[in-house]
Image (cartoon, rainbow, N blue to C red):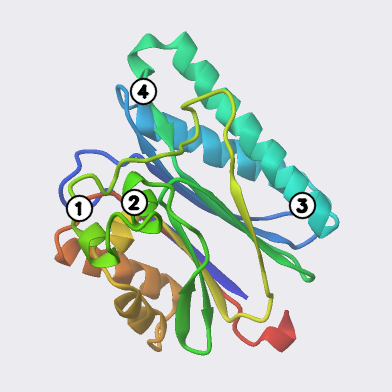
Amino acid sequence: MECSYITDSGKIRSHNEDSVTIVINKGNEYLLVVADGMGGHRGGEIASDIAVSHISDNFMELDKIGTKEEAINWLKEIVSAANLKIYQYTNENAESVGMGTTIVLALLTKDYLLFGNIGDSSGYVIKDNHIHKITNDHTLVDLLVKSGKLSAEEAKNHPRKNVLMRALGANTKVEMDIFDVETDIDGILLCSDGLTNMLTDDQIMKVLSEKLPIDDKVKKLVYKSNNRGGTDNISIAYLDRGDKSDN
């Protein structure tokens, strides 16, 4: 099992509002988290940092997360708590009004794999040299596609493609989608839309398939995104199962 994560401001943005981490608890269970912040006076980076720090710090204190049902409840509770922390920070700091963050996470234990997301940061699994998106984007454009008012092709370059329908910190309550995924996979990839807006799934998979050290793979994904314009912050968390018989 190998892990690597990275965040980069990109070529256009003056500062980085993303946060990312991969942590392991006392029971050798893995949590990957990516958050893409937005709004307020440097509020985006504060919001994403609050979310990632609160969730990861609490996870590392756990001996084990327990059954799948207990893990789902923990994820919902810890993300709700992070949401309230961001909301309260906004109330206490007028210059941060409007700040919030997306969140995408993956929790891997020896018995199950769970994904959760709010917003448009993405979660994927890698299996048999193919990349499969697990999460659904909570954007206005995605809603229009699902309702049949836009085609997938029209959605790609729609001027309002980044309008979020859900984000952490916007309200006192927030709903996170949870996905129960088969554990027979080769890898897990989480990323902010700074990667997926620049590279296609096939282009991402091509880099992940190369015979490179894991750190070099994530660096190459950032390099390629910046080479194509780097219009947003880019964050990646990648876990490679390697030989699954050893895990």
Q: Position of residue 103 (x, y in %)?
A: 50, 46
Determine whether, in the image, residue 232 is placed left or right of residue 62.
Answer: left
Which element is circle 3 on?
helix
- Asked if the residues shown at circle 2 and circle 1 are in contact, with their CB atoms under 8 angstroms apart, the answer is yes
* Residue identifier under label 2: 144
The answer for how far apart the CA atoms under marks 2 and 4 are is: 24 Å
Determine whether, in the image, residue 31 is placed left or right of residue 167.
Answer: right
Question: Does residue 197 lie above or below 9 as drawn?
Answer: below
* Residue identifier under label 3: 71
Q: Quadrant of residue 106?
A: bottom right
Mark 3 / mark 1, whichever is N-terminal: 3
* Residue identifier under label 1: 158
Badge nearest the viewer, 4 or 1: 1
Q: Residue furthest front?
A: 148
- Asked if the residues shown at circle 2 and circle 4 are in contact, with their CB atoms under 8 angstroms apart, the answer is no
The answer for how far apart the CA atoms under marks 4 and 3 are is: 31 Å
Q: Amino acid at mark 4?
A: Gly
Q: Judge the density around disc 1: few (<14), some (14-19), many (≥20) Cα neighbours within 10 Å.
A: few
Mark 2 / mark 1, whichever is N-terminal: 2
Q: Amino acid at mark 1?
A: His
